[in-house]
Image (spheres, rainbow, N blue to C red):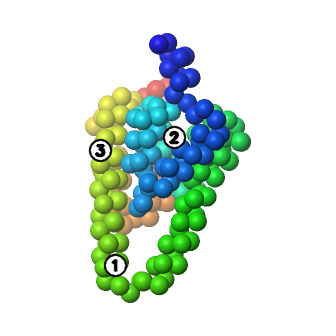
Amino acid sequence: MSSADNKSCCQPKSPADLFFSFTLLALQGFGGVLAVVQHNLVEQKRWMTREEFIEEWAVAQIMPGPNVVNLALMIGGRYFGLRGALAALAGMITVPLVLLLLLAVLYAHFAGHPGLAGALRGMGAVAAGLIGATGLKLASTLKTHPLGQALAVGFCVLGFIAVGLFRLPLMYVLPVLGGIACLLTYKKIKP
């Protein structure tokens, strides 16, 4: 199979395909959808490579709004323009919004139950584990980064220390570390 055939077989077939795919993704994303999105879009559907996912996820993170919604808009727009972006956005928010409203009503009714509080704490731990596991899985793409693996990991560690340990706001850490990393990468790849 040529790369052109491979490319055409691994893309959404229609805006409806985008809608249903992102609806299923959104319904699996309790506590964070990063792990599910990466697995589904990169490994199952093959709509993008790991490197493309990392690059577009980075862009989605620095844009205002939920990361995965930004990613859905970019993917939808890439394949079907505005129609695709709107279909992906509708897939991300329509069914989950209805479920969220129903759950909010239920939570308001049972918020004082100790079993519910324990279940929510447990789900938080699982979500943190999923995000950590996805980060480790995606770290293999740093081998090919122009900065080199050691320096790229160093930026990751600095980001974790700044945000996780020193509790600095991400809106200050990201432009500083991201700006330095972008500048160094530009210097490395500059012809």
Q: Label 2 to label 3, Cα distance in Å?
A: 18 Å
- Residue 181 has which mark? none
- Residue 136 has which mark? 3
Secondary structure category for the residue under label 3 = helix
Q: Which residue is mark 2?
A: 56
Q: Is residue 52 above or below residue 60?
A: above
Which of pointers 1 and 3 lies earlier in the amino acid sequence? Answer: 1
Nearest-to-viewer mark from 1 and 2: 1
**Res 61 seen here:** no
Q: Label 1 to label 3, Cα distance in Å?
A: 29 Å
Q: Label 1 to label 2, Cα distance in Å?
A: 35 Å
At x 70%, y 37%, the residue is: 81
Q: Measured from the top left, where is residue 95 in percent x and y?
A: 57, 59
Classed neighbour count for the residue bearing mark 3: other residues with Cα under 10 Å, few (<14), some (14–19), many (≥20): few
- The three-letter code of the residue at mark 3 reads Leu
Is residue 99 shown left or right of residue 83? left
Q: Which residue is mark 1?
A: 117
Secondary structure category for the residue under label 2 = helix
Q: Measured from the top left, where is residue 172 in percent x and y?
A: 47, 59
